[in-house]
Image (spheres, rainbow, N blue to C red):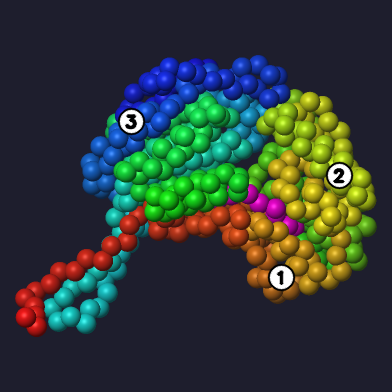
Amino acid sequence: MNVQLLIDGDDVKSRGKTTFERKDPYTSKVATIAEAGSVDDVNAACDAAAAAFPAWSEKGPTERRMLLLKAADLLEAKSADFIKLMMEETGATGPWSGFNVMFAAKVLREAACMTTMIHGEVIPSDKPGCFSMAIRQPAGVCVGMAPWNAPVILGVRAVAMPLACGNTVVMKASETCPGTHMLIGKVLQEAGLPKGVINVVTHSREDAPAVTEALIAHPAVRRINFTGSSHVGRIVAQTAAKYLKPVLLELGGKAPLLVLDDANIDDAVDAAAFGAFMHQGQICMSTERIIVDNKIADIFVGKLANKANALPYGDPRTKVVLGSLVSEHSADRMQELLDDAVKLGAKLVAGGKRAGTVWSATLLDNVTPKMRIYKEESFGPVKSIIRVDGDDEAVRIGNDTEYGLSSAVFSENIQRALAVAKRIQAGICHINGPTVNDEAQMPFGGTKDSGYGRFGGTAAIAEFTELRWITIESHQHYPF
């Protein structure tokens, strides 16, 4: 597939006249040839978005809603195209790719609902004859930067609420899935968004730093959102700070799943397996640390190991649970983490098998803080089991990380579980549910090195609008 830039409603080639290739991580065949956008292309896209902003920001909420609803329908209609691209560009399985399309359509429909939820308020004034109000207005041009791991969901999330709030958007596509992200732009364009309201820039890995800074620096850009690694998120935040621009960050995770001694073991096993191995563990919410009370650890680990060993893995185009990792580098890193842990005393209780970029579901028991995998985000299907004594130690271990995105607690005593959940330092906690869980209307985001700000529902309105104080005054008396 050949991918051009989408700028001001037109498919255009990069001004640098260069392209880059994205290869299928499983087959090594070329999946996409995309234009390598440059700083000049970024400026053109931002200029187009700025020119389109006045008219788009004045459109009524119903018109914006209807366009987003139409985009949701079109996105679903192109499900087969999205699935094919996702599988080829990222190594994802068919079910995960299909789920991406289904959930992304929900994100668009939820954003459509928000067009009439952008509220202000009247605030009593001490000034006689003064009518004082706070209103929310579109901020301007918004930049959305989305990752490759859930490219349709997160690509749509990067642009849907900004558009619903009356902003125009420049989307920076991931160099790992330029075709998938460009298709989102094409769907929105086909739905009827005016020229310049949605723009998409693809770029090579080498050009990413320059393209990112140019997007943030452009004078018309007023908001930035980024989903990706904490390392890159920190760079984005520092760059945004240099230009005094607000940024919404949803970054890495090291999600703990706490299994207390009164948990329903079978339920906890099912949730742990789903959270750890869905999409090969390449989800920001993936269960990274399975923290289990010693009183039930032997039974729990035995059942979880049996379940993990039974999960099929291999060619993502076949009926498997675990498909390909995104790259050879990622697969190599799984081996490094496993070897380090085993050398330092961890016990391999499930998996440990590799074929190219494919790994089986792998569990390491008796993981300790001296092992790399205790602290580092694996972002793959090699997972830790940490045994603890009591709730206090479980909470301490759960919080012993710089990350704080998702978490989970399993207990038959809901009051006990809720007390533990309140002590976990994470933006999200699920009681008796998996760490991998999302709904389009929920406030989604993290704490600590997992970022700040919230996507989803009414919480996201504050991220993509400007809150202004406006007064209407009658004749006033002045001291001079």
Quadrant occupied by the C terminus: bottom left
Q: Say which label, 3 or 2, has the lower sequence index.
A: 3
Name the residue carrying label 1: 420
Question: In this rendering, does residue 25 appear at all?
Answer: yes
Q: Looking at the picture, how far across and down is residue 250, in whole percent?
A: 55, 50
Task: Tell me the residue that label 3 is attached to.
Answer: 44
What whole-number distance in Å separates the C-alpha atoms at marks 1 and 2?
31 Å
For the residue pair 430 and 460, the one nearer the viewer reads as: 460
The residue indicated by pointer 2 is 340
Q: Residue furthest front?
A: 242
Per the image, label 3 sits on a secondary structure element best described as helix
Q: Which element type, helix, strand or loop, lies under badge 2?
A: helix
Task: Report x, y in % for residue 75.
Answer: 47, 33
Per the image, is 291 magenta?
no
| Neighbour tally class for label 1: few under 14, some 14-19, many 20 plus, Cα within 10 Å | many
Q: Which residues are magenta?
A: 250-257
Q: First in sequence, mark 1 or 2: give its number.
A: 2
Q: State how far apart marks 3 and 2 are (Cα).
A: 48 Å
**Kind of residue at badge 3:** Ala
Query: Total marks drawn?
Result: 3
For badge 1, the amino acid type reads: Val
Judged from the image, the secondary structure of the residue bearing numbered disc 1 is helix
Nearer to me, 155 or 267: 155
Q: Position of residue 195 (x, y in %)?
A: 29, 31
Amino acid on which the number 2 mark rests in the picture = Asp
**Residue 9 x, y percent position in the rendering:** 33, 27
